[in-house]
Amino acid sequence: MSVLVYIDTLGGNIAKNAMEAVTYGSKIGSTTVVTNGPISNDALASLGNYGASKVLVDRSITVNDSSQITNLIATAVESTGADTVIISLDLTGRAVASRVSARLKAGLAVGAIALPEGDGHIKVNVFSGKAYGHVKINTAKKIIALTPNSIPVETTGGSAAVEDFNGNAGASTVIVKEVKKQEGDVLLPEAELVVSGGRGLKGPENWGMVEDLAKVLGAATACSRPVADIGWRPHHEHVGQTGVAIRPNLYIAAGISGAIQHLAGVNGSKVIVVINTDPEAPFFKAADYGIVGDAFDVLPKLKAEIEKFKAQN
Amino acid sequence: MKLLVCISKAPDTTSKIDFTDNNTKFNEAGVQYIVNPYDEWYALVRALELKETLGGSVTTITVGNAGDDAIIRKALAIGADDAVRINAEANDAYYTAFQIAEYAKAGGFDIVFTGKETINYNGSQVGGMIAEIMGLPYISLAEKLDMNGSTATINREMKGGIEVVEVNTPFVISAAKGMAEQRIPNMRGIMAARTKPLQVVEPVACDELTTFTSYSLPPAKSACKYVDADNVAELVNLLHTEAKVI
Ligand SMILES: Cc1cc2nc3c(=O)[nH]c(=O)nc-3n(C[C@H](O)[C@H](O)[C@H](O)COP(=O)(O)OP(=O)(O)OC[C@H]3O[C@@H](n4cnc5c(N)ncnc54)[C@H](O)[C@@H]3O)c2cc1C
């Protein structure tokens, strides 16, 4: 099989979810990567380490425009003869995968969390992670949008040939006026460790405990919906069924009751730690580890213990 | 401005999720359907606000069967002027988008709105597909939309922050949190909705590109292991040696 993987490198680096997508592609067939970032050839050649044999780059596309990127991918599909297209379901992938599907009239499985099953069906997240769907793609060409953080990155030690590529992108349909960078070092959607707070933390002035713990862990911060609605925290930190869905390795929830809509956004986490004063809080049913206790007491202690642990390891 | 808002149904967020017929069908027994929150809270309300300040009309469009009329009436009660229902099951995103694009092409709409995703299939597919079929710009995950003549200024979610972009009508936009505040329909709206036009249109032929052949549920979680609040060091130890996440 011939596989084309699109990755977004407009940020100038290769994100972990891009490495995952290349790993995924290389397990299906011979993999070419197509991208459009202002990124060095050396960095692109390193995609060979995740299984790519070739990288095509069109540096004329400098803004994130779903029309241009769709043109690029369609042109690359034609020139490589790929029968399978892999796109990571990050913010760019969400806009692009559906366009490419309509352009190529190729079926799209969105939210894949594993390699195609033996019968070619693709297992995807549905009902906000509360169930899986098994999707059959009815067309010869297939598009798979891979959920970030659902398969491990694997390295092969290889290096890929990098070629300049004309994606026939056409003119951009959007003009970028301004970019407002999010504060904090670790971005929530791709974070492996997340510390989250709910209404139990009583007010925005108490978020120092959450941020301090996140800092020593190297984690991103998150919150429940009411916390974002009242304006204690920014909207982009709201996780849940109507916020961001995340799949970190570790999710620490303090002062969050664990309503079904909240769980829907975090149930893909590998390990969940719940800190709540109420032993009956529903979140404990979804937790791997629980502390029945006051977040105001436990969070600073946990931070101190993590610092101790980091000093020793 | 002529505005078209795509409205989908979704099971209420507290619905029990399980499947029947050998795990091939979502078990609808006891399930209450609501307007997909992203469609209702953000897309529809922002469209209504634009109409209120700039004039024009808001039409909703739904691909679904007669059972969907209740959620369509809710959208009319919130304030849409009229509604269209394409009389078909929305089983495949491309099929759904194709029906909507087919209707929208002839309508001369300035903006086609979708929600960021539906909360049952979480696909984020229909908006991008409509845009591609119609050959229009597509701005996804928008959390702010302002119009100045035929130019829109939009804040959209981007990796690591927010990007402010400009785009000209016509375009397709997917609405995320922040774009508007939820509106509760009042009695007058509910009464008026009963008599607003709901046009039923038969679908055009289109292949389904994908099929959900079966479903499964995640394995049950094992019981929570409790650690004493006075022994936080034990939690750190478990996270390191047992869970291996730090
Ligand atoms: C359609 C719909 C969509 C929704 N989508 C989302 C969503 O996407 N995300 C989301 O989060 N919610 C969502 N909700 C809201 C959800 O139902 C809950 O209301 C919300 O998650 C509760 O937030 P919370 O846990 O922070 O607050 P609360 O429910 O008020 O819980 C606070 C918790 O803190 C504990 N507590 C209090 N003091 C302390 C302390 N000192 N130390 C430790 N613990 C303490 C309490 O015991 C309690 O369990 C949605 C609701 C609806 C209807």
Image: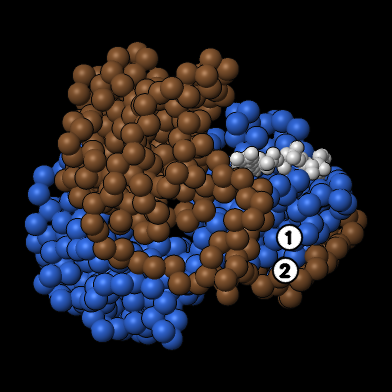
- Callout 1: 10 Å neighbours few (<14), some, many (20+)? many
Is A232 drawn above or below residue B68 in the view shown? above
Q: Ligand 1 sits in which quadrant?
A: top right
User: Does residue B239 appear left or right of residue B203 in this picture?
Assistant: right
How many numbered marks does the figure carry?
2
Q: Residue B171, can we see it?
A: yes
* Secondary structure beneath label 2: loop
Q: Nearer the viewer, residue B70 or B246?
A: B70
Picture quadrant of residue B19: bottom right
The colour scheme is by chain
Name which residue lies at 82% across and 49% down: A281
User: Does residue B49 appear left or right of residue A287 in this picture?
Assistant: left
Quarter that holds the N terminus of chain B: top left
The amino acid sitting under disc 1 is: Ala
Q: Which chain is blue?
A: A
- List x then y, in percent, for residue A12: 30, 55
Asked if labels 2 and 1 touch by Cβ distance under 8 angstroms, the answer is yes
Which residue in the protein does label 1 denote?
A286
Picture quadrant of residue A50: bottom left
Q: Label 1 is found on which chain of the structure?
A: A
Q: Label 2 is found on which chain of the structure?
A: B
- List x then y, in percent, for residue A104: 20, 63
User: Does residue A86 appear left or right of residue A303 in this picture?
Assistant: left
Which residue in the protein does label 2 denote?
B221
Is B104 drawn above or below residue A99 in the view shown? above
Q: Which chain is brown?
A: B
- List x then y, in percent, for residue B4: 31, 32
Q: Residue A62, can we see it?
A: no
Name which residue lies at 35% across and 66% down: B210
Ligand 1 neighbours mark 2 (CB distance < 8 Å): no
Quarter that holds the C terminus of chain B: bottom right
Is A38 drawn above or below residue A230 in the view shown? below
